[in-house]
Amino acid sequence: QVQLVESGGGLVQAGGSLTLSCRASGRTFSTQVMAWFRRAPGKEREVVAAIPWSGPTTYYTNSAKGRFTISRDNAKITVALQMNSLRPEDTGVYYCAASKKILREYTNQYDYAYWGQGTQVTVSS
């Protein structure tokens, strides 16, 4: 099993910044890809960004490109999501997720076996 613990959510004004962090523990060697998903009010959970544990690849959903940066620290087994220029539509519960698969496409939540408990991000206008 893999345990994921998120931190860093909160309330921020539009245009502000937040950094989310996800700490992984347990059988982390079994995971290949880490991702951040968001469940906005009244919407389905969707991927925001993803990063494999190795290699240069990163993935961002269109709305996150140019504003968010996903990064990993292999030594600390953590993944961070730096979010800048936040908008009210970025509001939601953000989940850290881990996949055991070597993925070519990162958007399918069912490819991720492990999930954190979620952290709330609220962006006020």
Image (spheres, rainbow, N blue to C red):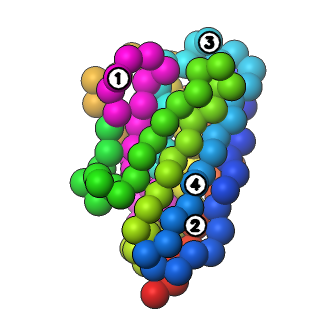
Q: CA distance from mark 2 to mark 4?
A: 10 Å
- Which is in the foreground here, disc 4 or disc 3? 4
Read off the residue under disc 4: 19
Instruction: Specify few, some or many for label 3: CA neighbours under 10 Å numbering under 14, 14-19, or 20 or more.
Output: few
The kind of residue tagged 2 is Val
Q: Position of residue 114 (x, y in %)?
A: 60, 32
Q: CA distance from mark 3 to mark 1?
A: 18 Å
Q: Nearer the viewer, residue 57 or 119?
A: 57
> At which x and y percent is residue 55?
38, 17
First reached walking from the N terminus: tag 2 or tag 1: 1
Q: Is residue 42 magenta-colored?
A: yes
Q: Residue at x 49, y 36 (%)?
A: 71
Asked whether 41 or 17 is in front, the reply is: 17
Q: Which residue is mark 2?
A: 121
The three-letter amino acid code for the residue at tag 3 is Phe
Q: Is residue 11 left or right of residue 81?
A: right
> In the image, which disc is placed on residue 56?
1
